[in-house]
Image: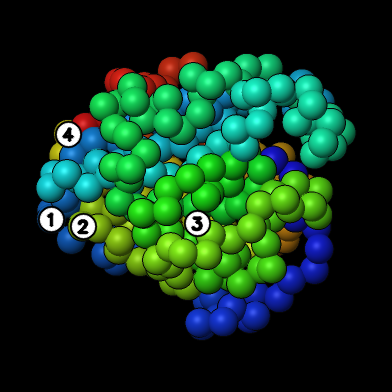
């Protein structure tokens, strides 16, 4: 989705500054992670369908459920706010979303609670909530998992509010949750590595997941929204130059680790992804 356009400095992070990603950055932890992975399965969650007006492409709005061998449930992103499942036109008008595109499908069955139920998981079962970034189609359920540790980049968390949409955010940061702020490559669980990939948004995160049968899967999230984006360019991003560097790093990492790439919103890939209750193992 369209990134936040207000100016923001990467070194404003209150914990540590975010290291600049350079093309050719090496990640040396992945082989060790694969041998000791605790990740059991990865499920793609269907948060609805959206059509972009500029080129007509229809994109899936997706999140992920990652489950560990010892029973931990990790949710990645939360889709649009629930108000879109109640009255999509009224919600779109309220947020001014029609300038960018329109929602094709988004019902209560596409909300996180219903998607998780397909996997036999309830919202209260979520141990960790990872936010790749805080645009409107990812941040809608940010406040719905108060028991979960909220994992987010320190850069993005240091913003006054989540990015949401078009320089407007009706969503506040959760007040009574445990935060885990990310400012560098971080192994969150054995087999699950968080990668700072700024550009699309100030503090965007991508994920490398190592599965027992499928092997490494790279969740680019919106750092590379579709396979064609690196060639088309990142002109709509918060920082196009940084977005290009982050994308190049991810593609190099995927090539070196022979990882399957799941893009953030790829129209051609979407139909073939295994969605809840099916999963990758």
Q: Nearer the viewer, mark 4 or mark 2?
A: 2
3D distance between C-alphas at marks 4 and 1: 13 Å
**The N terminus is located in which quarter?**
top right
What SS does tag 1 mark?
A: loop
- The total number of labels drawn is 4
Viewer-proximal residue, 39 or 118?
A: 118
Q: Residue at x 29, y 26 (%)?
A: 119
Numbered label attached to residue 213: 4
Q: Where residue 173 appears, x then y in whole percent?
A: 58, 61
Asked if residue 118 lies left or right of residue 24, the reply is left
3D distance between C-alphas at marks 3 and 1: 22 Å
Q: Which callout, 3 or 2, points at the residue further toward the start of the chain?
A: 2
Query: Is disc 4 in contact with disc 1, using a CB cutoff of under 8 Å?
Result: no
Viewer-proximal residue, 100 or 175?
A: 175
3D distance between C-alphas at marks 3 and 2: 17 Å
Rendered image quadrant of residue 4: bottom right
Numbered label attached to residue 190: 2
Query: Is disc 4 in contact with disc 3, using a CB cutoff of under 8 Å?
Result: no
Q: Which callout, 4 or 1, points at the residue further toward the start of the chain?
A: 1
């Amino acid at each position: 989705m369209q990134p936040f356009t207000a100016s923001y400095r990467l070194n404003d992070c209150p914990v540590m500054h975010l290291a600049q990603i350079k093309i050719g950055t090496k990640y040396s932890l992945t082989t060790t992670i694969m041998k000791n992975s605790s990740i059991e399965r990865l499920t793609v969650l269907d948060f609805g369908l959206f059509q972009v007006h500029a080129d007509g492409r229809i994109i899936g709005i997706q999140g992920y459920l990652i489950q560990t061998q010892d029973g931990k449930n990790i949710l990645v992103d939360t889709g649009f706010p629930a108000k879109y499942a109640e009255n999509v036109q009224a919600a779109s008008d309220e947020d001014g979303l029609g300038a960018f595109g329109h929602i094709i499908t988004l019902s209560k069955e596409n909300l996180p609670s219903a998607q998780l139920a397909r996997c036999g998981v309830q919202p209260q079962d979520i141990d960790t909530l990872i936010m790749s970034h805080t645009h409107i189609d990812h941040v809608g359920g940010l406040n719905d998992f108060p028991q979960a540790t909220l994992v987010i980049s320190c850069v993005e968390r240091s913003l006054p509010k989540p990015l949401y949409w078009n320089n407007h955010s009706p969503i506040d940061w959760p007040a009574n949750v445990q935060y885990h702020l990310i400012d560098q490559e971080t192994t969150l669980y054995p087999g699950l590595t968080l990668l700072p990939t700024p550009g699309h948004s100030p503090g965007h995160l991508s994920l490398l997941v190592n599965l027992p049968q499928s092997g490494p899967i790279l969740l680019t999230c919106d750092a590379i929204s579709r396979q064609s984006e690196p060639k088309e360019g990142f002109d709509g991003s918060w920082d196009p130059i940084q977005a290009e560097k982050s994308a190049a790093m991810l593609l190099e990492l995927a090539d070196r680790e022979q990882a399957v790439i799941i893009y953030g919103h790829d129209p051609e890939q979407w139909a073939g992804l295994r969605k809840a209750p099916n999963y990758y193992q």
